[in-house]
Image: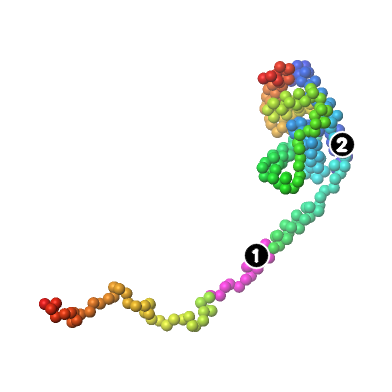
């Protein structure tokens, strides 16, 4: 480091330093003696404990609940339908149509 | 807090404010905030000196880190969402120095600040730490969190560039 050649720069910075010292805020030792904030930390721990307790309680509740019963056993007997053909009440389909015999045709059409 | 640390902080207070001013681009109000927040970190024991470096080096590192935190916060405030929230909250902060403060500032000092702001941040930092704070390049490198070789390179380039900028006819470039 060639300090002799840097004399010009040091002069500039020394003046800036002097100017800053004049405008620097006063030293306030009370800043260092400010008490900690245990209240905030305590509240944070309280909230975290409550949230954890809620999660554990919900987990225990769902783990201890009885398994759901089968819904078929609770159906009323009225819904039990007798065995039979499926769609028996519907009219026969188009493909099941049978044409009538020719006994009603006019006589001249009969060969 | 130990009495010896408090004494060291008191002795370093003016230079610490000068360093905070540099870290805050010569914004007086922001520098005060940064320094106050750094003191709070000490008071709340969120920053403790472990003895691996000198107290001044460590303390200036804390101030630099705090200034970067404040810069990020300011950038958020200047964003569109931040401005909207500030308007809703009615909290306004003008980072510019007051007109009276501007008048008070010495012209030559203001010129040096202007020139330093034209340098890359690393170069301006190392020059401030060496010439203003009277630290060695090695100590400056520790504060800046860079290697000694890198700091020396920033130092040499910064000196040359600053000399060019400080010449009277350099303002017409």
Residue A105 location in percent, x, y? 18, 79
Residue B84 location in percent, x, y? 69, 45
User: Which secondary structure lies at badge 1?
Assistant: helix
- Taking depth in this image into account, of B110 and A107 the one nearest to the observer is A107
Please give the residue where the numbered disc 2 appears in the rendered image.
A27
In the depicted structure, whether residue A50 falls above or below residue B158: below
In the depicted structure, whether residue B65 falls above or below residue A16: below
In the depicted structure, whether residue A4 falls above or below residue B102: above
Q: Earlier in the sequence, mark 2 or mark 1?
A: 2
User: Which secondary structure lies at badge 2?
Assistant: loop
Residue depicted at x 66% and y 42%:
B80
Q: Are marks 2 and 1 in contact (CB under 8 Å)?
A: no
Does the segment drawn in magenta span residue A59? yes
Chain hosting mark 1: A
Instruction: Determine the image quadrant of residue B8.
Output: top right
- Taking depth in this image into account, of A16 and A93 the one nearest to the observer is A93
Range of residues picked out in magenta: A55-70
Classify 10 Å Cα crowding around label 1: few (below 14), some (14-19), many (20 and above): few
Residue depicted at x 20% and y 80%:
A101
Q: Quadrant of the C terminus of chain A?
A: bottom left
Residue B61 circle label: none
Please give the residue where the numbered disc 1 appears in the rendered image.
A59
Residue B107 can be seen in this image: yes
């Amino acid at each position: 480091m060639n300090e002799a050649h840097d004399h010009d720069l040091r002069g500039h910075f020394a003046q800036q330093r002097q100017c800053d010292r004049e405008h620097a805020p006063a030293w306030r030792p009370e800043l260092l003696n400010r008490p900690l904030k245990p209240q905030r930390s305590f509240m944070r721990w309280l909230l975290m404990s409550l949230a954890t307790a809620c999660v554990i309680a919900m987990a225990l509740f769902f783990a201890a609940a009885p398994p759901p019963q089968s819904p078929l056993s609770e159906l009323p007997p009225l819904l039990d339908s007798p065995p039979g053909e499926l769609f028996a009440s519907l009219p026969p389909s188009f493909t099941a149509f049978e044409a009538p015999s020719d006994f009603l045709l006019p006589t001249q059409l009969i060969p | 807090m130990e009495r010896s640390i408090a004494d060291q902080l008191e002795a370093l207070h003016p230079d610490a404010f000068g360093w905070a001013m540099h870290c805050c681009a010569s914004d007086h109000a922001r520098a005060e905030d940064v320094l106050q927040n750094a003191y709070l970190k000490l008071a709340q024991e969120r920053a403790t000196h472990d003895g691996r470096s000198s107290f001044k080096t460590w303390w200036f590192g804390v101030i630099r880190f705090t200034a970067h935190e404040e810069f990020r916060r300011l950038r958020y405030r200047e964003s569109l969402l931040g401005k909207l929230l500030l308007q809703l909250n009615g909290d306004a902060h003008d980072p510019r120095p007051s007109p009276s403060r501007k008048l008070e500032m010495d012209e030559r000092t203001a010129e040096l600040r202007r020139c330093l702001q034209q340098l890359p941040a690393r170069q301006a930092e190392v020059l401030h730490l060496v010439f203003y704070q009277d630290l060695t390049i090695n100590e400056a490198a520790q504060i800046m969190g860079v290697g000694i070789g890198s700091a020396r390179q920033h130092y040499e380039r910064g000196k040359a560039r600053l000399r060019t900028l400080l010449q009277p006819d350099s303002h017409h470039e």
